[in-house]
Each structure stands twice: as structure tokens, then as C-alpha cells.
Image (cartoon, grey):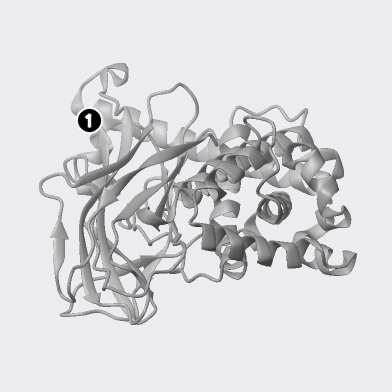
Amino acid sequence: MSTHFRSRPKRTWRYALPAVLVTTAVAATLVPAQAVAGVNAATRVEQAEAVLQMTTPDPTRTDPEVLAVTSAASDALEYSIAVVAADPSREYPEGSVESTLRAGLLTLPPAAQREATEAALRMVNADVEARVAEFGQYGRNDWTTHSRLGFARVFQAETLTVDRAALTARLTAQADQLAIAGRAAEQQVHDEARKLGVDPSTIKRVKALALDITSVKCVEETNDWWFEDEIQIGGLTVGSDGVTKKVAPFDVSGNFDSGETVNYGDGGKRFATLDMSQDGVWPRHYWFSVILNEKDNGSFADALTTAWDQVKGYVKTAIEKLVEGVLSPYLGAAIAGAIGKAVAWLVNVFIGWLIKLFKDETFKPQNAHVLLPSNAEFMYTNPIYLGWDNHRTPTMAGTFDGHGGLYYVYANLEVLT
């Protein structure tokens, strides 16, 4: 994937999540819970292009307890970033969140490290009230204590301020809804098999879900943002079981003019693939997060990706402890979906905080989310079912818009057999 980046004065560090759009056409008669992330027309459309922009599901109403847990994790992570930046010379246990962050921080240019350290010291040396405002409950500890304990020891389910009964009731209800949707989807598979005159057990199943970036168009150049260095794109995936995996960054080109389009050819550039073949319940949530950063400014963005991967694991464990004793085969799917929504919602807040620390600019971050009803292959071959055709969604366009620039990122989802 390539975008245009005009030659500009060099900045210290870049980190952005362009909006990657997923399928919007889903047959309403299939399953009530199968809806995909909502979309709306972008505010700026050039040459009558049908550009749609994904809207992240709002968990403040649907999953407030999970959002509270995830928000606390974000607070603790921000404090860890600040204490690591405040004293980059301090070493941390291998495999810890802080060790990951420090390794990334040390790849930044010296000037960027100094700026981050100065900003972090102002934050961590503030009084308790200011630290609590910045880092939530974790700001009650002085920064040397947080540095000594680390994220893993301060973020504990037992210390979270969350209504356990409400969390349990909400996730149980969501699990029940998924069960109803799953039974409806499987019934449709059986009904279709009867129409075809075949044994339902012989229906072909898809094995994986992929996100392919097909092209990128620069509609308007940014006013004063990017330097012409190479850009890397990486990110995260979140599977139906809530497991997150890092997408290794790959190099992309820069220095394209307004109106130019970079095409990746037939099939597009494979961004990531998620397994759909594992045993378990349906429907299932799948998430793709795309992260864009400047290659020559170190690997801190990549380290942040890894740290978020670790943090989401702690969030999942904490929620499982809080709802311990609930017996439902759909509970894991409900937790995974709720965490995905909460993390997607918090990314904007988290990136905003990073901007304050690193004095940087980013485009508005987004996540791509889809909820699929079944792994029955026939559902993805004919648009009458889910809007897919020959295993692919129609080509959809996401946008990232800011700093005077407008870029369209074209992508497809594809199921693999």
C-alpha cells in the first residue's frame, strides 16, 4: 500500500490508523446478530466516487462495564509509557509491557527521546490530583512505585471499580443472543442443504478470513505533515476468541502527487488472515486494526502495537475473573466482541494522549469489524446471502482525512477455502 507524502521538514514520529472499510451489504433476513459495522457516506467525495466510512460501534451504551475495564487498562498502560519515557535507562523484566515499550523507545532518534522524556517527567512529577486525572486510579502511586510494580501487578481484576453483577448479566444476555443467532444461522445452512439435495454435513466450510488492500488514492496532499521517507504499515488482528496478533509491518512507498492511485494488482496486498476453522460457536466477531508509521523514526509504533496486544490479554483475563462461574459456550464470543468494541472506541483516546506526550499529529484512528453468521462456504459465493460474491466483498473505500489531506484506502474482505 502506498500513499503520497510530500517532502516536509522532518518530524519525530508517526502513528496512525487509517479507516479500512468492511462489507456493508448483509441480508436482513439471515440472522439479527449478523450486522456488520455501520457505515455512512464520507463528507467529501471526488468525482462521484461512492466512498463510505466505517463507524466504530459505541460501547458506552452496549458494553459500559467492559469499557470501564478496558479504560482502566488504557490508564495503566499510559502510566507505564510515561514512566518508561521518564527514565529510559531503567531496565525491566523481559517480556513485560514496560520492557516492550522501552525497547521501542530506544529506537527513536535522540531528539525525539529527549522530548518524550521531558514531557513524561512533567506528567509523572505532577501532584497526586493531576496524576489521577491523567492516569486514573493508578496515578495514586508515585511513578517510581509504578515503575517497580509494572503494568502486570497494578492492573488486577480485584482492584477494578466495576459492577460485577451488571457485567455478568450483560455478558450473559449477549451470550444468549449469540446462541439464538447461531442456531438461526445453522438452521439456514440445513435449509439450504435440503434445497440442494445434499447432506448438511457435506457442505463446504471456509477456513479463514483475509483483509486485502487493493489500492490507495491520494485525493489531496497534506499541508504540512509527512516527510518523504518510506512508510511502514502494520497492525493487529483480533479473532473471535479475543486473541490478538500483531501484523508484521511492511514497507510502502511515498512521494505521490494529488490524484495519483497506487494499485496492488489482482487480489490486492494481503494485510492479514484470521482463522475461521477452529471449533466453536457462531456467529463470530473479527477485527482488523491498521497502523501506519514512518519507517525512519524507529520502531516505537511497532512496540506500542505489541504492548496493546499484551494489554488486551490482561483485559480478557480480568473480565473472565469478574464473571467466573458463568456457564455458557457463547460467553467467550460475547467477551471477545465486547472487548473489541471497547478497544476500538478507546484507540481515539489513547492516540490523543500519545499526541500530547510526543507532540505529534495523526489521522483519526479506526478499526475494521465484521460479525459473520457461519463458515458455510455457500453464504460467501452469492450476493443473495451476505452481499459477498465469489468469496469476496465488493470493493469498499475507507478514508483518512486530516491535515489538509484526503486519502482513500480501497479494500476487500475475502474468505479462504
| Residue occupying image coordinates x 80% and y 67% | 133
Q: Quadrant of residue 97?
A: top right
The answer to whether residue 148 is seen in the rendering is yes
Q: Which residue is mark 1?
A: 195
The quarter of the image holding the C terminus is top left
Q: Nearer the viewer, residue 254 or 50?
A: 254
* Residue 232, x across and y down, in percent: 33, 52
**Left of 120 or right of it: where is 110?**
left
The quarter of the image holding the N terminus is bottom left
397 over 315 or under it: above or below: below
Q: Nearer the viewer, residue 134 or 396?
A: 134
410 over 89 or under it: above or below: below
Element marked by disc 1: helix
Badge 1 density bin: few <14, some 14–19, many ≥20, Cα 10 Å: few
| Residue occupying image coordinates x 20% and y 23% | 197
| Residue occupying image coordinates x 78% and y 28% | 325
Q: Amino acid at mark 1?
A: Lys
* Residue 278, x across and y down, in percent: 43, 23
* Residue 187, x across and y down, in percent: 40, 32
The answer to whether residue 175 is seen in the rendering is no
**Left of 207 or right of it: where is 241?**
right
Q: Nearer the viewer, residue 173 or 257?
A: 257
